[in-house]
Image: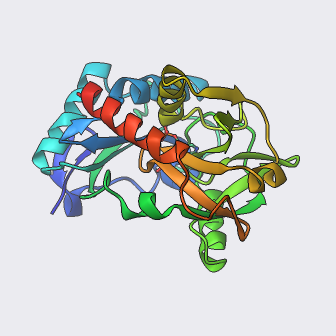
Amino acid sequence: MRTVYVNGEYLPEDEAKISIFDRGFLMADGVYEVTSVLDGKLIDFDGHAVRLKRSLDELDMASPVSDEDLLAIHRDLVEKNGIVEGLVYLQITRGAPADRDFAFPDPDEVPSSIVLFTQNKPGLAASPAAQKGMKVISIEDIRWGRRDIKTVQLLYPSMGKMMAKKAGADDAWMIQDGHVTEGTSNNAYIVKGNKIITRPRSNDILHGITRAAVLRFAEEAQMEVEERLFTIDEAKEADEAFITSASTFVMPVVEIDGVALGDGVPGKVAPRLREIYLDESRKAAI
Ligand code: PDD
């Protein structure tokens, strides 16, 4: 059984409890981070900690732990659960007031809630899906306008995943005003020749930690990166496409809305970026 962390305590998962009045549960008033683990070490922890702080600040939410404690809890959980490859999930909500109320509670009276747990994923790096590539469909992006904040409001992304599943695909890319925003839980890219094209950062997408690292590695490897909007039709005519996230690293996309890209198998750029990303991330892991 997993050991999880809830509000200051390490507990077996079946003993961990959160109030029914917790605003995360009632209002989706919470933020989260997912950090990957390779070789028992945390990948890009600092990037996730910085983004967490930004999400909390944007929502005027207090952090219940210091940065040092946050790292210590991540490491403790990885060790207690013997995680070699997998993920650490972290969630902070605006706590549990005495009753349901739209107004925020006074943070001096109601502390934020914090929950962390691990997900064991042996074979995460050597994923067969990365060899095969994935299929995506396109759906309208009807999410709220602050997607740069990593909130736990994941109903529409979950619905998108189900729409993809129903269509025999693996994931959905979301479209706003004719342009691709991102995947349901990842950032989206297309490749034309040696050029990697991805949507620029704004309130319309989550500023992926994997995205930042991959774009840096791409430029270091003399690949050209163009941050601009692209349409789904342009994507269907691209040489390659891929996604990035903490849970998938770099994953090739081989089909969009039933249209095969290139030969319908992963090309050169995405697998190479995946390799570079995994190598460099392992070296820098803590
Ligand atoms: N999702 N865009 C969205 C909408 C996401 O939910 C995520 C991450 C990303 C990629 O961000 P990063 O590279 O920092 O993981 C982009 C996580 C993995 C999840 O919800 O499980």
The residue at the point 49 percent across, 25 percent down is 221
Q: For residue 190, what is the image quadrant?
A: top right
Q: Nearer the viewer, residue 27 or 161?
A: 161
| Residue 203 place in picture, x, y as percent | 71, 32
| Residue 144 place in picture, x, y as percent | 73, 45
Q: For residue 9, what is the image quadrant?
A: top left
| Residue 260 place in picture, x, y as percent | 68, 65
The residue at the point 27 percent across, 34 percent down is 282
Q: Nearer the viewer, residue 279 or 63?
A: 279
Residue 61 visible, this angle: no
Q: The C terminus lies in which quarter of the figure?
A: top left
Give the colouring mode of the picture.
Answer: rainbow
Q: How many marks?
A: 0
The residue at the point 68 percent across, 39 percent down is 193
The residue at the point 66 percent across, 72 percent down is 163
Residue 185 visible, this angle: yes
Q: The N terminus lies in which quarter of the figure?
A: bottom left
Q: Name the side, left or right, on which 72 lies relative to 56.
A: left
Residue lying furthest right: 177
Q: Name the side, left or right, on which 122 lies relative to 280.
A: left
Q: For residue 134, what is the image quadrant?
A: bottom right
Q: Nearer the viewer, residue 138 or 33?
A: 138
Q: Name the side, left or right, on which 211 lies relative to 6.
A: right
Above or below for 38 versus 133: above
| Residue 213 place in picture, x, y as percent | 47, 28
